[in-house]
Image: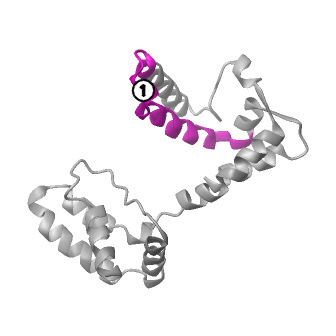
Amino acid sequence: MEEVVEGIEDLTDHREKVCLGDALDEFGSRSFGPLLVLLPLIELSPVGGIPGVPTVLALLIASIAVQILFGKEHVWVPGFIEKRALSADRLNKWAHRLEGTAARIDHWFKVLAPSPELRKWYGHVPERWPEFRSRYEAELASADEDEMQRLLDTCRAGPVSFVFAARDEARNSAVVLRDHVMKKLL
């Protein structure tokens, strides 16, 4: 995210207006990512409840997926949309406001995640949960101390979200990590 914000700031240098086409050229293949995040977020918002909106969003996401499959350099959009422009000053102010948020989003404590071998072994089989929990706690006990300290400091500084992709909200790595952090903080 920080790279995207920096790219936006670079685009606004020495220009009065920035066209969407210029942004797509600047970001190249990275232009797919923000759209693949933004469109589902729109669907999850109240706007997603408007009849027809989910279908349009699904078609846009499918269009982006097809473009990725065909190896497009960047997202294709119709010419009349590509030529739409925003004030460079306004875009630059927007980018500056996003800098702090982008930095927070970019930091992911990947080294504190369960090892790939452990994740594959667990496979979200409920009967393996107690053993997974035990093994992951052992991994956390021997994890990178600097990263663990950074996570603890982050938790002390304010609210933290432990994100997970598992369907089971009660038995996943985020639960183990959260409990491990809570024990260390108390």
- The quarter of the rendered structure image containing the C terminus is bottom left
Q: Is residue 137 magenta?
A: no
Relative vertical location of residue 19 with respect to residue 133 in this rendering, above or below: above
Question: Tag 1: Cα neighbours inside 10 Å, few (<14), some, or many (≥20)?
Answer: some
Q: Nearer the viewer, residue 101 or 168?
A: 101
Q: Is residue 32 magenta?
A: yes
What residue is at 44 percent from the left and 63 percent from the top? 159
Q: Position of residue 107 (x, y in %)?
A: 52, 64
Give the extent of the magenta segment: 26-55
* Left or right of 183 on screen, residue 150: right
Q: Position of residue 132 (x, y in %)?
A: 19, 68
User: Mark 1 sits on what residue?
Assistant: 48
Q: In the image, what residue type sits under mark 1?
A: Gly
Relative vertical location of residue 92 with respect to residue 122 in this rendering, above or below: above
Relative vertical location of residue 160 with respect to residue 31 in this rendering, above or below: below
Q: Secondary structure at mark 1?
A: helix
Relative vertical location of residue 109 with respect to residue 185 in this rendering, above or below: above
What residue is at 45 percent from the left and 81 percent from the top? 149
Q: Position of residue 23 (x, y in %)?
A: 73, 37
What residue is at 47 percent from the left and 67 percent from the top? 158
